[in-house]
Amino acid sequence: MKNMKYLLLRRVTQITLLVLYFGANAYGWHMLEGTFGSSLLFGIIPLADPYTTLQVLATGFVLGADVLLGALIITLFYMLVGGRAFCSWVCPINMVTDLANWLRRKLNLDKEEVNYRFIKRKARYWIMVLGLIVSAVVGVAAFEVLSPITIMQRGIIFGFGAGISVIIAIFLFDLFGVKNGWCGHLCPLGASYSLIGKASIIRVKHDHEACTACMKCKVVCPENQVLHMINKESISVTDGECTNCGRCIDVCDDNALGFGIRSFTNKSKD
Amino acid sequence: MANSDNNRRKFMATTLQSVGLTALGGLLWSGYSDEVKASPLVLRPPGALPEEDFLKACIKCGLCAEACVNRESNIDRETGKQRPGTLQMAKGGDHRMIGTPFFTPLDVPCYMCDDIPCVPVCPSGALDQLSVSNEKGELDIDKSRMGLAVVHKESCIAFWGIQCDACYRACPLLDEAISLQYQKNERTGKHAFLLPVVHSDVCTGCGLCEKACVTEEPAIFILPIEQSTGKAGSHYVKGWDIKDQERVREAKEIKTKTERSEKEAADYLNVEVEY
């Protein structure tokens, strides 16, 4: 079980959050109410998604203070502490795309000849900006119209309806289309958390001395461009696109990877 | 030199491609979003902003729907179990803006709770607490305008002469939002029609009348305010209303000149319409 530690921890976190959200509607619990767009923690602390908040502001609507404060709290948390951890520790779509990614490897779909790469990883940043423009033009939070994240979350809380097809579409896209296609290329919410979490203190650290260059980490990493230092130098993964999922740490047999606190003293070796 | 030229050309080409694809995406995305928000026949929770603003403001968190279903009063008196809530969150296939709250009176109408649990929990301001508060700042559900009841008199059996006052009695604002108008039934010569008449200055659009209606398809039903009301226009002034007269106290004579007014009224009004 050693190589499942963070995977299991993430699943427990994701499912616990969903159970709390589900219970808020089904049983009237006051632990965590609402959805990721805007929530209420313990019945008082507002939480709100920063990108969703920006979309609503882009429509020209002056939002209530609860949402603005909630977005500030979430932004500060991921900015200072979590990095892009929302994507791998909270987001329910992560479970869908992880499954697709795992199946890809099992079904040998990862070989270059069957891996379509017609989308660049930078596309998500374009989509993120585009989402704000479309919100302003159409007068509705544009990503929220089709976001599989909240469609899945609301599906679990209130029932899916035909919304399940969006989840299946993402699964098929990641499985048969582009590897890590949704989370790693298209999702504007992930893009926003990449930017927010760029400077967070929790980071994966690489120990070049212990590394045997087996490259298991690069195989399993959903954003493996962030692992450019593997077998090269002993530094932290500082790229904001790292989701702090910890899969690389799980699969490393050499203890060459581990979570750590970003060091601010030595710039070149942070 | 040739290399840097190549690089520059490649950079130009990929930038152009990114911009172009973004424009393509923007057009598709805008078109799709604009289409899906066009579902005018949707009933919103109490205090909801006008639809256009509501769609901007709603952050789709579901707190209103959760407050609705989990309110203490939502217990079936016979079974002691919780009933389904009035407010539903639109799912894919509901053909309403996904993730926004709405209700269907025929399934579950709004019971007009005094404490309006769905409104104060709204974090974004899409449900405006002020619009459902009285002058003292207390919540007042009677001020809500979720829709307006409309009677289809051809299918309403009261208009046939059958005595039915189901909607009248179901109305939480009894004898205010719906009154019964007595009229002689000339067909029988000795009976009265008891005709339901909706008063739009009082009706909240809760939908209890629609739920109570006894006909196969309800003969009284709730439509959103925008679809169920007309507008006379400000140039109609009620000559018998002193307050309305005030509006034109300072008015000066305006002579409107259009293509039609070149002719005498008697002439242009008698011109046949060409089909």
Image: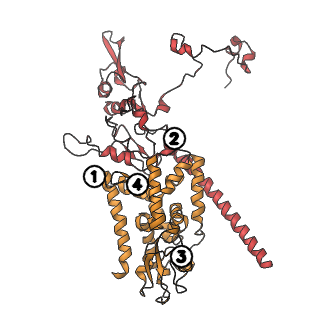
Chain colours: A orange, B red
Residue B165 lies in quadrant: top left
Q: Which residue is mark 4?
A: A35
Picture residue at 20% right of the left edge, 39% below the top: B77
Q: CA distance from mark 1 to mark 4?
A: 16 Å
Picture residue at 58% right of the left edge, 72% below the top: A117
| Amino acid at circle 2 | Asp
Residue B185 lies in quadrant: top left
Task: Specify whether disc 2 shares its chain with disc 1.
Answer: no
* Mark 1 and mark 4 residues within 8 Å of each other at the beta carbon: no
Q: Nearer the viewer, residue B161 or B237?
A: B237
Coordinates of residue B30 in the picture (x, y in percent): 59, 51
Residue B78 visible? The answer is: yes
Chain label for disc 2: B
Q: CA distance from mark 3 to mark 4?
A: 30 Å
Disc marking residue A226: 3
Residue B130 vertical position relative to residue A4 in the rendered view, above or below: above
